Amino acid sequence: MRPDHLQSFIDDVGLVLSSTDDEHEITARIAERLSDLLAGGYRLPPEVTRPSSGRHMTYPLYIAPDDGWSLASVVWDVGQRTDVHSHETWGVAGIYAGVEHEFRYLKPAASTACAPLTPAGETRWTPGQVTVCCTTDDDVHAVAAVGDGPTVGIHVYGGNIATIRRRSYDPATGASRWFVSGWDSPVVDGDRPRASGHR
C-alpha cells in the first residue's frame, strides 16, 4: 500500500469524527478502517518501528490541528511491559508487527479508590488484529511484548495522547498517580531515541 493510503485513513477518521459524538460508534467505525489499512499492506517508515532497550516508544504519525485526535506508532522491545494505566479517552489499536499480550482491568469507581483492581481478562493480539482498547468508561490495562521480535502497534486516540493527564495504577492496591506520557522522537542518523515529556 502506498503512503498516500495513510492520508486516506486520516481523512476517513476525520469524516467519522465529524459525523458522530458516540464513542462506541466512533471506535467501531475506526476499527474497521484500521483493519483495512493493515490488511492493505501499509508499511510504516522504519524510523517509527524501532524499539528502545529502556522502555516502549510512542511515535507521532498524525496529530489533529485541534488536538481532537492523534495517530501513533507504539513500539515495545521483546519482553517490555507497561504499567497498568488509563487513557482517559477512547482508543483503537491494531497490531502491525509482533505479539501483544493485553491485561485488562475494570475501571475503578471513585467509591472503590485504593482497593485492588479487578482483572477483566487477557488477550493475545497478533499482526492484523484490531481492538477497541479503550472508551472513557472502560480504559484500564497493561500490555506486554511477548513475540520473538518487537511489537509495533498503530494506535488512534480521541485526543493528543501525549498531552492527556492519565493514571498509572498499582493493581494490588488500587493506588494511582497522574502522568503525562509525551511523544518520542524517531531515531535519525543513528541517534539514540529521545523522549519528550515523562512517563
Image: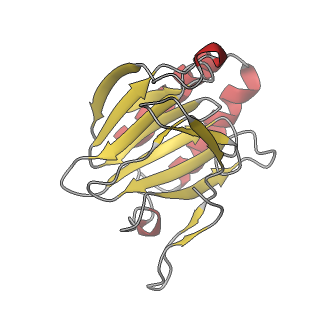
Residue placed furthest toward the right:
66
Residue nearest the observer in this picture, 133 or 171: 171
Expressed as whole percent of the image width and height from the top left, the position of residue 2 reads: 46, 55
Q: Where on the picture, by quarter, is residue 70? A: top right
Expressed as whole percent of the image width and height from the top left, the position of residue 159 reads: 70, 40
Q: Is residue 92 left or right of residue 136?
A: left
Expressed as whole percent of the image width and height from the top left, the position of residue 85 reads: 52, 38
Residue depicted at 69% across the width and 46% down the height: 160
Q: Does residue 40 appear anywhere in the picture?
A: no
Residue nearest the observer in this picture, 97 or 164: 164
Expressed as whole percent of the image width and height from the top left, the position of residue 82 reads: 42, 47
* In the rendered image, the vertical position of residue 40 relative to residue 2, given as above or below: above
Residue depicted at 38% across the width and 41% down the height: 143
Residue depicted at 56% across the width and 32% down the height: 91
Residue depicted at 69% across the width and 40% down the height: 69
Q: Does residue 198 appear anywhere in the picture?
A: yes
- Quarter holding the C terminus is bottom right
Residue nearest the observer in this picture, 34 or 143: 143
